[in-house]
Image: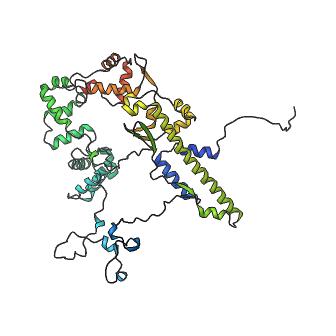
Amino acid sequence: MSLELRQHLKLAQKLLMTQQLQQAIKLLQLNRLELLGALQAEMEQNPLLEEVQPEDSGLVEMQPAEEIGEGGETPITGRVTGDDPAATAEVNWEDYSNNFDADFSFARETPAADAPSRLDFVSATPNLVSFLAWQLTHLCLDERDLDIARFILGNLDGHGFLDAEIADICQHVGCSHQEAEGMLRLVQSLDPPGVAARSVQESLLLQLERKGLEDSLAGYIVTDFFEELQNRNFADIVRRTGSNIREVQKAAVLIAALNPYPGNAYSSEPVQYITPDVYVIKVDDEFVVQLNSEDIPQLQLSVEYREMLTAKLTADSKEYLHNKKRNAQLLISALDYRQSTICRVMESIIRHQREFFEKGPGFLKPLVLSDIAQDVGVHESTVSRAAANKYVHTPQGLYELKYFFSTVAAESEDGEDMTAESIKQRLGQFVRQENPAKPLSDGALAELLEKDGIKVARRTIAKYREQMKIPPVKHRRKN
């Protein structure tokens, strides 16, 4: 059999990911903060992209009619007064901003030359390690002890616990076991009480020791019956300690008032607030969708660079500008597609989940991606990307867009489909209304739901309860 080359025609259909489609998909799945970063990076790389600047509008203070001069001319307000305003010396704003007025008096005394500047008072929020290091500076410690203490401070986690063993301290600092134990006890004597502990149990014992209660019933329970205390097994503690139930409960209340994680109060991590991508506002009887376009730049093609395309340039320069112009146009088109798609998806969600926006989470209906895709006229993957990492501010609160998509979890007696979220809302209501002395078990919760016509298995109740962070019966019981 001989090998030979032949030419033939073949007709086939296949999906091609064009550059425009790739960019549209990329921008669609970005949240608001990621979109800001992507647009800023593209504007830095593409000279033909620029932000639309609002027209300069001078703010003129409105004057009463009697102050308007003859001929309808409005007088200039805020005019500098004086014999020769133009000859006024220029203000040294740097010296003015650094002027310190703490020593101000009616005698108009001049502050000292070495007085601190206002900028000297600008500081960051101190964290746990800096607070402990500040306390160590008031102790008379030699350099060796300071090295051990610094190593201990450097190995504290966010809760204030020591994330190292005594052997690690001895190995890295080169000290004896006795020296490491002594410096650890010294650090544990600093504020906040319970710091540098190696477990929650040790932290509670250190706090009781600071109060002088290490030999009390509370200290005895934390030392020998910590597991029973966690499970609120007071009956076993009463039987094994020989105390009565009132004394054990009083000790448990005292222990509960302690802080098991003393370092949390000194956390310097900034709080990350969620900025919604979409707002849903109720106007009369209709819900209006408004995209959050704050800080998102409005892009346009640079006029100066477009004029350069008609000028006499080298072939390489013209090719470079044409490529940048095409990329800029694709980006602007993809950005418009992203905004319109998110808006249409949110409008479709409102049509399907109107009862939720009217009454709350308990009226959330089952909804899948295909329902929204069919309504909007796009593919399911497009809806999934539009809802990914996006948040919407509604009259019921702030929610992730994916929150509105859920399958059928149960069916009521009247044939109405129930979502997992609506069932969780009822479970939370039952738990809030239960008797603290006799909390409801998972089986009892399932029976209450069945009385309402909702049949859910007990193991499903347990799963929902864990997702809602509701502790089991033994941890909810309050005698």
Give the x, y percent position of residue 457: 38, 18
Q: Quadrant of residue 70?
A: bottom left
Q: Please say if 452 is above or below 2.
A: above
Give the farthest residue toward the right. 2
Q: How is the image coloured?
A: rainbow
Say which quadrant the N terminus sits in.
Answer: top right
Side of 25 relative to 147 (left or right): right
Side of 476 relative to 385 (left or right): left
Q: Please say if 439 is above or below 181.
A: above
| Point 23% across, 41% down: residue | 259
Q: Nearer the viewer, residue 152 or 89?
A: 89
Say which quadrant the C terminus sits in.
Answer: top left
Q: Nearer the viewer, residue 194 or 430?
A: 430
Give the x, y percent position of residue 173: 32, 52
Q: Please say if 309 is above or below 252.
A: below
Side of 442 relative to 381 (left or right): left
| Point 30% across, 60% down: residue | 123
Side of 69 relative to 6 (left or right): left
Q: Nearer the viewer, residue 227 or 36?
A: 36
Evaluate whether residue 452 shows in this view: yes
